[in-house]
Structure formats: structure tokens, C-alpha cells
Image (cartoon, grey):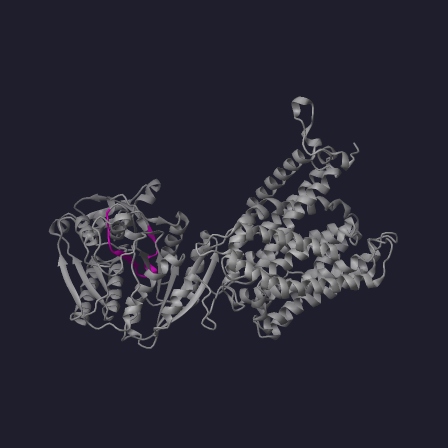
Amino acid sequence: MTFNITAVKTSSNGAWQGDNPLNFAFPLLIIQTALIIAVSRSLAVLFKPLRQPKVIAEIVGGILLGPSALGRNTTYMDRIFPKWSMPILESVASIGLLFFLFLVGLELDLSSIRRSGKRAFGIAVAGITLPFLGGVGVAFVIRSTLYTAVDRPGYAEFLVFMGVALSITAFPVLARILAELKLLTTQIGETAMSAAAFNDVAAWILLALAVALAGNGEGGGEKKSPLVSLWVLLSGVGFVVFMLVVIRPGMKWVAKRGSLENGVVRESYVCLTLAGVMVSGFATDLIGIHSIFGAFVFGLTIPKDGEFGQRLIERIEDFVSGLLLPLYFATSGLKTDVAKIRGAVSWGMLGLVVVTACVGKIVGTFAVAVMVKVPAREALTLGFLMNTKGLVELIVLNIGKEKKVLNDETFAILVLMALFTTFITTPTVMAIYKPARGTHRKLKDLSASEDSTKEELRILACLHGPPNVSSLISVIESIRTTKMRQLKLFVMHLMELTERSSSIIMVQKARKNGFPFVQRYRHGECHSNVIGGFQAYRQLGRVAVRPITAVSPLHTMHEDICHMAETKRVTMIILPFHKRWNVDHGHDHHRHQDGGDGNVPENVGHGWRLVNQRVLKNAPCSVAVLVDRGLGSIEAQSSSVDESNVVERVCVIFFGGPDDREALELAGRMAEHPAVKVTVIRFLVRETLRSNAVTLRPAPSKCKEKNYAFVTTNVDPEKEKELDEGALEDFKNKWREMVEYKEKEPNNIIEETLSIGQSQDFDLIVVGRGRLPSAEVAALAERQAEHPELGPIGDVLASSITHIIPSLLVVQQHNKAHVEEMTVSKIVNESSLSISGDTNV
């Protein structure tokens, strides 16, 4: 059935009046959009175990919906994707593409590219030049083989289009692949991201050149004067200069005026910016390049610092990336007909294109990387990473098809090439490049490192955001004594990597010196609220602070933390608890016994709780979890205090076991600080527990979240007792004059522990996690746990309903033999303390 597009109505009168909604523009657009989203999302779920980027699923989804698969059914194509509907679908998709390229422009920080260094620049140039030359060579073969004399395009535009198609690297796709593979914080990840940023800029310049040349007569049509292409190029250069020289300062003013102190972005400035995207797109289309080029350049003019850009993206990214952009990939797939590739010659051309693209990019990158002294394995990995294709590749191909430079067969070949090269990136890199994790020297426990007087104490402090800063500084300051060697602090800002493009914006914010995810200080400038507090703290001396940003999915965030701890040889990891009490106690110690609003915690999410649990299980060093109840910073007073000016009061509750001994060792370091008063309270075993010991049995699997986990390692109780007594004796001998020591034999451990927590005597309580429990701690195994990862004593003190006042630090000592844990329940009998199955605790 033939349709006149001008006769197509927007909406129907409904099925009851005899109208078929599929014959009307808007209802059909709804069906098409819903089908495309459903297929692309379903494929994304299927490809997720293969760790493939979302772009793969969206391109494959479009191909499946198009003439290559479902489109072979002519009834389906005529009903769901009729030819008259394609201009409407492509127009809507182009709006999404326009705004997405605006977001891509925001991602690209030109200042970081300038600082990336000669190594990344050399690798980028080689990664573009060789595949571009290879593409030019292949273009001669394809032009003479797959084109007839009638539809054969001009040499210049076809050569440039083929060269660009084979030499592009997808910067956003590469960033996500690196994040998935945990390579973002490695040297190879830094180099790949910097080189890809160079490549991105070069790709846009080449694309503008290709479009300008293609406009000089389309597909064998009437040839225009070569001066037309020159005018197009000069106009494009003038447009870019105008945007960067005139519009960029204007957008800085808009960003400054648009961001209020309370964080609310003014609606008028948002509308002005969105209108600017459309106007910029129209301007470049008027010039003769393409509307997306204008949107991309306009994105470059938006300031990368400050809240305006981030808030702006949060307004539009989900709608654009989640709904409109998949339509563009689908339209690309609908234009791709794999059936056009038939015969040995066509399939041979596909093989030639794939081999040329891979060899050119990989060999070019590998050769230069080796020349700049990158190890061979890493250089080869860089080559495969730089071979990633994505959205810009499809844009080039679609423009080429639109300008009739690429015919259906060549278009299908290049789409399959882009799919193949991107698909092989992740599995190939996983096979080739395996970072030497676990081969670093064994990290010393905090207690063991005391003997090493030459080695600095290294701590990895993790945080979710600004609310964690003051409490972490307070804990670090109490550990930093005036007598000990220098302390080196690695501050890791944990950011969740989602499918939203603003996650990559967060990456860019941490990329101020051209290297992703390691943000250094330059010219005293503070680039984030999180790092700002530590920058001021660093000025106190004796603490070297290095901030790091980890951007990762929550389910693999622990790998980043543990790998960083191992790489940097840290002695202890400090994690923020997933709940935080918003109480500003200050240092006056006049607190309300009922806790007030402080007993309503802020929960950052269950996903972050799972991160802590995985770190506790897999950490290569000791771990401490900080439960913050308004612990204030003492760094301002620490430089001028005297022996009597106590700013922070710390209590260590000691029951026994490796974790408690680690907490005791930490207390010794705190005792050296002149502004910290340490009190150690030892709980003794009552006679009733000596005569009626405890047997622990595995808890039912369905109760694991409600029961505590203890280690299943065989231990000698007498030896553990001897170690406890020795640690206490050494502690008292060393710190007798500086620490208050008490012993208690309570009738009820929970009540006595709560009385300590509910008193106004302490600012911070330090306890061991108690994985290898003493008899009195094991007796709490039958208690229903609220936070089992903190151990029995830590859970009691972290409870939301017990009106605890001090903050809490739960310490776990690293011991390779104590990694196997089992959730247990308690049974009282006359036997020795053990876990059922002849495993002694």
C-alpha cells in the first residue's frame, strides 16, 4: 500500500470508529519505541554476563528488528516499520542523538587532554594514522568491487569516510569497558583514556572533513565546485572558533548565575542552554556539516567544574540515553541488511575490512607503545582497547549512507565490523592482560608493623561523600601521633558506576591532571568538597594524603578497594558504615541522653552494606568499619594542644581474640596522641561460663542475615588466652602512664556494654569484630543480629534503638587462616567452646 507522507495524520479516532492506529503517525511511533526499548533491554540482560557494553545490545537489537531478521517478513515490516514512518522515527531519534552528543561534549575535558602528555598523544596518533591509511587502501578495493559505474562515489569523500570508519575509538564505550574490567586506576587505563580523548577530537575533525567533501555532489549526482567544500570547512572552523572564544565565556557566566548556593539550578538558564543546543545544531546544519557537530561543540563550551553541568545532565540524561538514543541505534539496524552481503567477494570484503581495522589499530598502537617503553603485554592490551567502536562510528556510517557515499552492502559490512571489533574487546583484554594481583608482598597486620620503624604507616580511608570527611579525619588524626613515623593516607572516594552518562562525568571530574581517577592538588585548587577537607588536613604535616576516585558497579566495588589496598601496601582499610547518624555533637560533651534526632540514621543503601561485607571477607589487610554518630574533627586543635587538653576520649572494650588484640594495638597508637585520652576496659570471663561453655552450630541458610559469622579455623584456646594475656601485659607496660585500664566481670554483657555506649564519657568506642570469639562473646550467638558484619559487640553498639552516643570503630585483624567463616547459632552444654563438626573456635 502506497502512502503519501503529507496525507498521514498524527493520531487516530480509535478502533471503535474503524481506525487502525498503526496507520497513524503517533500511535505507530509509540509501538515502535516500545518494541525497540523492550528488545534492546532484553538483549542487554543477555549480554551482561559477557560484560559487553550496552551499545552492543542496542545495535544488535536494531539489526534483529530490521530486514536482516524479523524484517524478512514483509507483513511485519509494512505494519510496524513502513517506509512512510521512517522519516518520523529518524527525526525523533535525531533529537535524542543531538542531545546525547551534547552530553558527549560535556564528557570531554579539553584541558585534561592538553595535560595528558606525549606518550598518550603518540599512541593516539599512531592509532589513528595506520588504520586510516589502511582504510584508504581498502576503499580503493571496495570502490572498484562493490560499486557499479553509475553509483560509484567520488574518490575523495569515499576515501575519507572509509579511513574515518576504520580509525575511530569510542571514548564513552571504552570508559565503561575499562570500568567493568577494573583497569581504570591502572597505568594502562590512564593511557587508554587519554589516547581515546585525543582520538575523539581527531575523529570529529575528520568527520567534519568527510561531510564537507560528501556535500560536494552526492552519489554521482551533479558535481559542485570544489570551492564549496572549502567554504564548508572554513565556515566550520569559524563556527568552532566562535563557540570557544565567544560562547564559552558566556556559558561560564550562565553556569555561575544558574547555580544557586542551595544547589537549585534556575529553570530559565536550563531552558537557555537546551535552546542553545538546538540553535548550535541548526547553525552547523546550515553550514553544511551536520547538526550533531554543533551540539557536540556546544557541549564543549559548558564549564566542567561546578554544579551547573552536572545538574543539567541529571535533568535530561535518562530521557535521552534511556529512551531516545536506542531509537537511533535501531534506525541504524533497520538500515542494515546482512542479506546484501552475498557471494564470496562480499564476504571476502567483510573479512578484509575487519582484518584491516584490527591490524591497523592494534599494530599501530602496539608499535608506538613499545617505543615509549610500555611492556609488550600492556602494549598489546592497549591496541585492543583502542580498537573499540561505538556511537561515533555509527554516526559516520549513517551520514555516509545518507550522503549516498556508502551503499547498502558497504554499510552492512562496516556495521558488522564495528560490532565485531567492539564485541571482542572485553574477552580479549581479559585473556591478555591479567594484573598481578596477589603477587605483592604480604601485607603486615597493624600489630605486626609496629616493629618496622623505617616503614611509614599506610591507611586506605574510603568514603561515600562529604558527610564522611570530618569523622574520618578525626579517626586518622587520633592515629597520627607526634612521635611516630610519617603516616601515608590514601583517600578513596567511592562512586557507583551506573548506566547513566553522568557516571562518566564523575570520572571526568576526577581527571583534572589528565589521568583518570587519581586527582592531585594543583596550584592549591580544590576540585571537590570531598577532597577539600583532606587538602586542608594535609597542611598539618606528618600525613601525606593522596586522593583516589573509584568508579565501579557496587557489586564489584570491593575489588577496587582490595586491589588498591594490595597495590599500595596499606596496613588498614577504614570503611564508612552504611548508616550515619546526623548529629553534630561538637566537643562540649553536653549531650542528651536520649540521643534526640541522632537515633534516626541516614541509610545510604543496602548495596553499600554489601560492599563492606565483601571487603571484610576479601581484604588483604586489617579492616575497620566506622559507625559515625557525629564524630568531630580535631585537626584544628591538634597542633596546639598540651598534655591536659584532651579533645577526644576513646574507649577500647577488650574480650580477647585476634580482632580485639588488633583493636588494642590501635589503641596504643592513639595513646601516643597528646589530645586523645584512651581507656581500656577488659571484660573477664565469669565462673558460670567456665563451667558451662558454649557449642556453636551452623545456622540455617535462611537465617544467615540474622546470625553472626565466626571463623571455622582450628585454634588452641589455651594459646589464644596466652596471646591475649601477653598483648595486655605488653600494652600496660608500654602505656601505663598514658592509658586508664579497667577490668570488669559483668553479669550481663549486653547491659554493661550498652551502659558504656549510653554514657557521656567517650567520643569513640573501639571494639574487635570478634570472629574468633571468647566464651562470653560466643554466648551472644543466639541473639538476633541487626548488623552481623560488625560482630556481636559491634552490633549491640550500632543498634538503631539503643540510644548510643559515641561513634564506633569495629576492627578486624587480617589473618590468612581466618578467611573461612560460618554463620552460627548457640547451644549451651557441658562441652568445650566449639563449632559443630569438630572444629574448635
| Residue found at x 68% / y 54% | 281
Q: Nearer the viewer, residue 150 or 639?
A: 639
Residue 441 placement: quadrant: bottom left
Residue 61 placement: quadrant: top right
Residue 101 x, y percent position in the rendering: 63, 54
14 relative position to 716: left or right: right
Residue 584 x, y percent position in the rendering: 29, 56
Q: Nearer the viewer, residue 459 or 587?
A: 587
* Quadrant in the picture for the N terminus: top right
Residue lying farthest bottom? Answer: 454
Q: Nearer the viewer, residue 146 or 436?
A: 146
Residue 231 x, y percent position in the rendering: 78, 63
Residue 558 x, y percent position in the rendering: 42, 56
Q: Is residue 808 above or below residue 739?
A: above
| Residue found at x 77% / y 50% | 409
798 relative position to 559: left or right: left
Q: Which residues are magenta?
A: 802-821
542 relative position to 218: left or right: left
Q: Nearer the viewer, residue 709 or 233?
A: 233
Q: Is residue 50 above or below residue 186?
A: above
